[in-house]
């Protein structure tokens, strides 16, 4: 829950007392191994999940086995909210790294909403961000070329990673295979490899294992016309502020 609270405090003016109902949300923690499926398409989830540590991917499969990665889940993210409406999952979620997640029941989170309008509004803010990222994904894959897609995707993940201490400065941990990146961006893994090699050769990035450094971040921003305003991460003056009542 620490990761989720840290994320909410980035958007909202919260003191420690205000987050107490969320920190005390009933549930249990579960360790998940890399490659394990947390949700399968067609499942009827009985619990929602909050990512405490580790990364996962949300994806769908076509009948011939082709995969579309819909988004990447990081610490502080919440899924699968079909549990609120007793709907079957229309996608799958697989761990990209070893993870620790908290399982919660829908009725327990609703109790938190009912007891704290602040938390309900703050979680709404995270939903606004996720919707904005999905819109940006449509533009990224529909109108940008391969180099622009990869640069934009990497820059987005960098900004998100900094929020939850998955990076520092221009460096961050990127535990995604080229196959996962390709499936997120509608590219082959070979094409992803070529573009990343070009970025390295041009001095835009360096990579050491799972860690990537944006050596010339400004050039990457210019390449893909990256505007992070859709992430709402620089909107400190517009943070949600709450009445004392």
Image (cartoon, rainbow, N blue to C red):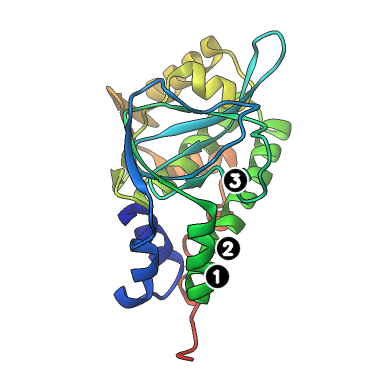
Front one among 45 and 198: 45
Q: Distance from label 1 to label 2 (Cα)?
A: 5 Å
Q: Is residue 160 above or below residue 179?
A: below
Q: For the residue labelled by badge 2, is the local secondary structure a helix, a strand or a loop?
A: helix
Q: In this view, does 225 lie above or below 204?
A: below
| Numbered mark located on residue 121 in the image | 1
Does any portion of residue 239 appear in the rendered image?
Answer: no
Find disc 2 in the rendering and name its residue.
Answer: 124
| Nearer-N-terminus badge (3/1) | 3
Which label sits in the foreground, 2 or 3?
3
Identify the residue shown where x is 48% and y is 59%: 108
Q: In this view, does 99 lie above or below 228?
A: above
Q: For the residue labelled by badge 1, is the local secondary structure a helix, a strand or a loop?
A: helix
Which quadrant holds residue 24?
A: bottom left
Which quadrant holds residue 129?
A: bottom right
Is 141 on the left or on the right of 126, as rendered? right
> Does the CB distance between marks 2 and 3 fall below 8 Å?
no
> Does the CB distance between marks 1 and 2 fall below 8 Å?
yes
Is 38 on the left or on the right of 65, as rendered? left
Q: Distance from label 3 to label 1 (Cα)?
A: 19 Å
| Numbered mark located on residue 44 in the image | none
Indicate the position of residue 3 as horizontal and vertical percent values. Answer: 34, 53
Q: Distance from label 2 to label 3 (Cα)?
A: 17 Å
Find disc 3 in the rendering and name its residue.
Answer: 83
| Nearer-N-terminus badge (2/3) | 3
Give the residue at the far bottom of this rendering: 245
Is 73 on the left or on the right of 87, as rendered? left
């Amino acid at each position: 829950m620490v990761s989720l609270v840290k994320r909410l405090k980035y958007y909202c003016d919260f003191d420690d007392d205000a987050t107490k109902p969320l920190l005390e949300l009933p549930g249990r923690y579960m360790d998940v191994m890399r490659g394990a499926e947390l949700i399968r398409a067609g499942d009827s989830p009985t619990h929602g999940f909050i990512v405490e540590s580790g990364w996962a991917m949300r994806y769908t499969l076509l009948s011939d086995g082709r995969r579309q990665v819909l988004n990447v889940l990081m610490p502080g993210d919440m899924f699968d909210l079909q549990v609120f409406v007793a709907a079957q999952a229309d996608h799958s979620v697989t761990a990209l790294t070893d993870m620790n997640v908290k399982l919660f029941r829908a009725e327990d989170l609703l109790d938190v909403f009912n007891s704290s309008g602040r938390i309900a509004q703050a979680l709404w803010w995270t939903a606004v961000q996720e919707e904005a990222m999905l819109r940006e994904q449509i533009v990224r894959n529909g109108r940008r070329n391969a180099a622009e897609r990869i640069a934009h995707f990497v820059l987005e993940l960098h900004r998100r990673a900094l929020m939850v201490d998955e990076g520092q400065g221009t460096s961050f941990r990127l535990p995604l295979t080229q196959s996962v990146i390709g499936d997120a961006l509608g590219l082959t893994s070979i094409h992803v490899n070529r573009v990343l090699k070009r970025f390295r050769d041009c001095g835009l990035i360096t990579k050491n294992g799972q860690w990537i450094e944006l050596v010339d971040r400004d050039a990457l921003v210019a390449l893909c016309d990256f505007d992070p305003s859709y992430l709402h991460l620089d909107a400190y003056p517009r943070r949600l502020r709450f009445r004392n009542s």
